[in-house]
Amino acid sequence: MLPGDAVVHEVRCLTLSALGDYTAAAAGLNSLLSSAPRHGLDVGQQFVRRGRGLHHPARKLEQFVDTRSEDAAARFILAYQYLMLGEQDLAVAMLREVTRLQPQDSVAARMLTALDPPPAPS
C-alpha cells in the first residue's frame, strides 16, 4: 500500500530479522538501501538500541552467524545492527565478509567503501 515509504520497509526488515528470517530481511534491507541510500534508519536505531544483554537483537544474530560461516544475509543484517549501535569497526568486519561471500552485492560494497575507504594511491 505504501511502496515508497522507507520506514514501512525498514520496519518490515526489522520484523523479519527478529523472527529469524535473515534472508528475507537482508533482501529487503539491501533493496531499501539501494533505492533510498540516504534514508536515516531511525527506526532501526530505536529497535536495535532498545534490547539489552543476552536479549539484544545482535546477540541472537551473532550466535546464528557463528554457526553459519557462509551466510552472507545474516552477516549483512548483523553489519546493519552494528551500525545502529555505533559499532563501526564491527560493521566493517561484517561487511568485508559479506563482500567476500557475495562479491556482486553493490550495496554492501558501497557501505564498506563509505565506512572504510581504500587508501589513496601514493
Image: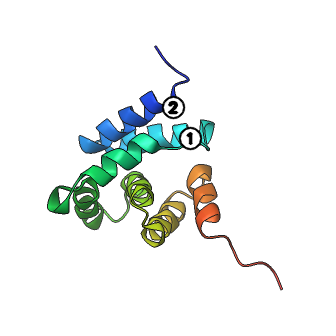
Label 2: how many residues lie within 10 Å, few (<14), some (14-19) or many (20+)? Answer: some
User: Quick one: 92 or 75, which is closer to the camera?
Assistant: 92
Task: Kindly identify which residue carries mark 2.
Answer: 6
> Label 1 amino acid?
His
User: Quick one: 101 or 82, which is closer to the camera?
Assistant: 82
Q: Residue 56: image x %, image y %?
A: 22, 56
User: Quick one: 99 or 80, which is closer to the camera?
Assistant: 80
Q: Position of 109 compared to 93: left or right?
A: right
Establish if 96 lies above or below 84. below
Establish if 35 lies above or below 44. above
Task: Kindly identify which residue carries mark 1.
Answer: 39
Quadrant for residue 74, please give it. bottom left
Identity of the residue furthest to the bottom in this view: 122
Establish if 56 lies above or below 24. below
Q: Residue 78: image x %, image y %?
A: 37, 57
Determine contact: label 1, label 2, CB under 8 Å: yes
Q: Residue at x 34, y 40 (%)?
A: 14
Q: Residue at x 64, y 62 (%)?
A: 114
Q: Quadrant of the C terminus?
A: bottom right
